Amino acid sequence: MIIIYHNPRCTKSREGLSEIEKYNQPFVIRRYLDDPFTKEELTNVIEKLGIKPLELVRTKEKIWIEEYKGKNLTDNEIIDAMLLHPKLIERPIIVKDNQAVIARPKEAVNKILGNI
């Protein structure tokens, strides 16, 4: 199954969605701001991305700068911050089976869907 974690107000997220649609494969849109991640789901996505939690954070967001920047946070604390403030999560995220990619730029979608 293909899932896009999407924010329709974000230009990059809309571009990622448009890129997925080119593959003519079934997919699910998850508006993660309206339907937030559970801790287990977010941890699982981070593992599939193969990154540290901080790499998924939008560090230029006001909330990050005001509340978290410069603090020595554990991975677990960073995940908790993203759960508390989903706006901090980089988007869009595309998940297919055991793979995931942050589709910025939109061509990154090809990394996991290009072999369909």
Image: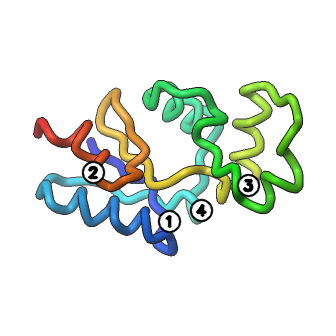
Name the amino acid, label 4.
Leu
- In this figure, which residue is indicated by the disc labeled 3? 85
Neighbour class for label 3 at 10 Å: few (<14), some, many (≥20)? some
- In this figure, which residue is indicated by the disc labeled 4? 33
**Separation (CA) of disc 4 from disc 1:** 7 Å
Of callouts 2 and 4, which one flags the residue occurring earlier in the amino acid sequence? 4
Determine contact: label 1, label 2, CB under 8 Å.
Answer: no
Name the amino acid, label 3.
His
Name the amino acid, label 2.
Glu
Residue 27 sits above or below residue 74 on the image? below
Frontmost of labels 2 and 4 is 2
- In this figure, which residue is indicated by the disc labeled 1? 7
* Residue found at x 27% / y 51%: 107
Determine contact: label 4, label 3, CB under 8 Å.
Answer: no
Residue 82 location (% of width, % of height): 70, 46
Of callouts 4 and 3, which one flags the residue occurring earlier in the amino acid sequence? 4
Q: Disc 2 on helix, strand or loop?
A: helix
Residue 21 picture quarter: bottom left
Determine contact: label 2, label 3, CB under 8 Å.
Answer: no
- In this figure, which residue is indicated by the disc labeled 2? 107
Residue 33 picture quarter: bottom right
Of callouts 4 and 1, which one flags the residue occurring earlier in the amino acid sequence? 1
Residue 115 location (% of width, % of height): 12, 36
Residue 22 sits above or below residue 55 on the image? below
Of callouts 2 and 3, which one flags the residue occurring earlier in the amino acid sequence? 3
**Separation (CA) of disc 1 from disc 3:** 14 Å
**Separation (CA) of disc 2 from disc 4:** 23 Å
Determine contact: label 2, label 4, CB under 8 Å.
Answer: no
Residue 93 location (% of width, % of height): 43, 48
